[in-house]
Structure formats: C-alpha cells, structure tokens
C-alpha cells in the first residue's frame, strides 16, 4: 500500500504553476497522479505527445481551448477533461483565481518534467 501526504511529495514548478507529484513511474502503479495548480491569469500552450492526461477540477476556474481556438470548454469544480488524442490545447486560469486540478498521466511521469512555455510551439513532455 502506498500512502503519501501532500507535504511529503515532490513539488515541481512546471511553468505556470506547481505540480505536487503523488505517484510517479518509480511507484510502479502504471500512471501518475498530481495535484496541479495553474496560477491565476496564466495561459499555457500545451501538448502531451508521450502521455494521455485527464484533469479533474477541484477548485478555481478557467478554460481549456482547442489549439485552433475554435472550441472553449469552461473548467469549474466538478468538471473533468481528458486529452485522449494527445490534443494540443491552451489551459487558461481565470484572472482572479488559481485553477486546482487533479491530473492523471498515462504512462507515468518520471518526476522532473517541466514545460518550455516561452517557445512559439506547444510545450510537450
């Protein structure tokens, strides 16, 4: 059995927030579980070419937008979105509140992955 407390896990500054990484590849579960905080007022250009990701909102609000900007999904507590096709997307936190997500990655993360958000292309890992 694996039991971890938030204050005991690896915390990574991923680019526009923090990621508390509860389960990683080394834990042998076959997936990663993170508590991801997206800083208020930020916009992140993301794509996971090597992982599938699902995010469940537990606090705050924001939106996830398709890469072409054609579709916007509002994210509020109780909403889940899943990037089932390695979808390039924009993750946007509301200007006045952080966006708190529980993020699941498959296959699992190693633990030190971060984003290059200054690039003109979608950041990936």
Image (cartoon, rainbow, N blue to C red):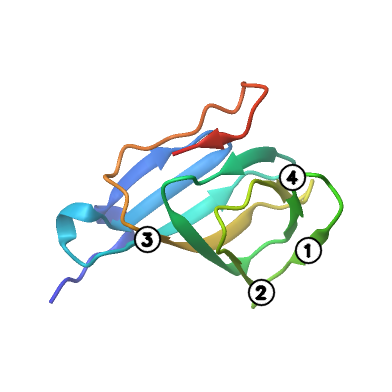
Residue at disc 1, secondary structure: strand
Residue at disc 4, secondary structure: loop
Sequence order check, earlier mark of 3 and 2: 2
At horizontal 71% and vertical 52% (from top left) the residue drawn is: 97
User: Which of the image's four quarters has the C terminus?
Assistant: top left
Query: In the rendered image, which residue does mark 1 sit on?
Result: 73
Quadrant of res 40:
top right
Horizontal side of residue 69 vs 98, given as left or right: right
At horizontal 62% and vertical 21% (from top left) the residue drawn is: 118
Query: In the rendered image, which residue does mark 3 sit on?
Result: 106
At horizontal 81% and vertical 44% (from top left) the residue drawn is: 68
Q: Is residue 81 above or below residue 86?
A: below
Q: Is residue 29 above or below residue 117?
A: below
Query: In the rendered image, which residue does mark 4 sit on?
Result: 67
Q: Dots 4 and 1: beta carbons under 8 Å? A: no
Q: CA distance from mark 4 to mark 1?
A: 12 Å
Q: CA distance from mark 2 to mark 4?
A: 20 Å
Horizontal side of residue 24 vs 34, given as left or right: left
User: Can you tell which of label 2 and label 1 is closer to the viewer?
Assistant: 1
């Amino acid at each position: 059995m694996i039991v971890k407390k938030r204050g005991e896990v690896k915390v990574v500054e991923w680019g526009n927030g923090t990621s508390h990484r509860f389960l990683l590849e080394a834990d042998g579960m076959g997936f990663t579980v993170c508590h991801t905080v997206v800083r208020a007022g930020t916009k992140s250009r993301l794509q996971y070419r090597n992982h599938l990701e699902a995010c469940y909102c537990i606090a705050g609000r924001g939106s996830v937008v398709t890469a072409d900007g054609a579709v916007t999904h509002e994210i509020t507590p109780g909403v889940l979105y899943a990037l089932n096709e390695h979808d390039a997307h924009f993750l946007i936190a509301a200007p006045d509140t952080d966006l708190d997500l529980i993020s699941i990655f498959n296959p699992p993360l190693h633990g030190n992955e971060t984003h290059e958000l200054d690039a003109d292309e979608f950041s990936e890992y």
